[in-house]
Amino acid sequence: MAWSEKLKLNKQLIRTVTEAGYISPKEIQQKTLARIYGGQDVIAVGPEGCGKTTTYILAVLNRIKYNPEGVPLVLILVPTKEAVLEVIGRIEEFGKNKQMAVVGLYAATGTEAQMDALADGADIVVATPDRARAIYLKLGLNLNKIELLIVDDADAIVKQGLQLPVVELANSITKCQHLVFTEVVHDRLNKMISPFMQSATTVEVEEINDSKVETLPQLLYHVPNFITKLNLLNLFMQDSELFTKTVVFVNTRHTAEKIYKSLQNRQKNSVSVLNPWSIELSGVKDITDLKVSPELRILIIANENKETIDLSYIPFIIHFDLPEEKEIFIDRVTRNLTGVDEETLAITFTTDLELTLVKRIEQAIGQKIPVGELPEELVIELDKKEAEPQEKKPVKSKVTAPVAGEAFHQKKPENAKTYNYSSGVKAKMNKKKKHG
């Protein structure tokens, strides 16, 4: 499909885009451009490389007209300095025939040069949220004429903890159209954009690899935070009859130590660390020790150990953290078909902040990872900000019985039963008992 009149791009822009090698629109452009030109607020969700950045750049360039005032009409927020420079480069590539001024705002020595550039006139501002907010507070960024606010790589902005400046900038604009582009949508992202995206249209595209990677059976557990991950791991490891041998992957030694100390409270001599770095940690030098030891059930491995690890004949591997490089994860869960009869179940714990990497893994392996039901007896840890009461109340006298809503730990309402696995998880896990 070539660029059609339905997408409402001007002829000069179509010519420029085609000359740059973009012969036809991608799915996300087909689904969003007409909505954007219609004035809708849009949340566009799609994987890396699906064309999100190109989409909003085309929308911006198609919209920008002669602006004699030199006051910004478009504000584009991106997570990093590198992203600022990349977006500016793409705007200049597609808008080479337009008379317009683009200014980038990002962390640099002082703010004077960037404020001077804004004072000279800007049609489009591309910025990291923190730097845009800092210059706005110094009265160097005029938001009075903004017609279009774009938040790109919104999931990465949330991961960096830059939600507050995004919300403050959005609230400082009297009225404009809002576009949000992201790889995933989750609770933290929704919390950031909800103040200014109340009636947005969500458009989602999926691009899964055509060639499917044969992986081990997998389950994904989505939890709110680190402590809930730890609670879930402890809950699973209590079942020594099922979890006979388990490898737990983490990203750092610090996390490994926390997990080790937490598990040791109940597991005693059944937990160990691969290549320990402290005398306080019980450790082994090789994964073979886990396989042959009658006592050892749980081996914690920090991803700082880069050597290849033989995971054959291990009933369970748990990714407590996802490695930053998806190839490492995929290598661990790829099925080994060289005569191994025994099955391994690969379990992954994830929070909102890791969902982007989960999506990229699914895209690479050509399949969705099944989501497991959280066990009924799992204690869900509230984030501290959510646990704090909104209003300060008078100090009460000593309370002898727990009061609903005052505990920092909170169970799911249905968790009144004795601990048990969900039926779906049972069906997948019961097969593992042959490893005992």
Image (spheres, rainbow, N blue to C red):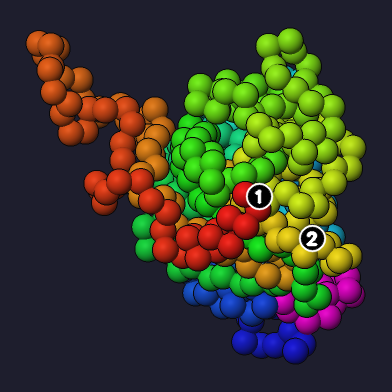
Q: Tell me the number on the disc at residue 64.
A: none
**Cβ atoms under marks 1 and 2 closer than 8 Å:** no
Secondary structure category for the residue under label 2: loop
Location of residue 365 by image quarter: bottom right
Q: Is residue 223 magenta?
A: no
Q: Please state which of residues 191 and 321 is positioned toward the viewer in this rendering.
A: 321
Query: Looking at the picture, which amino acid does disc 1 mark?
Result: Phe
In this rendering, the count of numbered labels is 2
Report x, y in % for residue 32.
58, 73
Q: In this rendering, would 187 be left or right of 321?
A: left
Q: Position of residue 374 (x, y in %)?
A: 43, 52
**What amino acid is labelled 2 in the image?**
Thr
Taking the image as shown, residue 48 lies to the left or right of residue 307, namely left
Where does residue 390 sit, x and y in percent of width and height? Answer: 25, 29
What residue does disc 1 label?
A: 316
Image vertical order of residue 17 relative to residue 282, above or below: below
Taking the image as shown, residue 227 lies to the left or right of residue 380, namely right
Which of the pair 234/320 is nearer the observer? 234
> Label 2, on which residue?
334
Q: Residue at x 64, y 72 (%)?
A: 206
Q: Which residues are magenta?
A: 13-26
Residue 24 belongs to magenta span: yes
Residue 75, percent from left and from top: 60, 48
Labels 1 and 2: the sequence-earlier one:
1
Kindly indicate the quadrant of the structure image that contains residue 30: bottom right
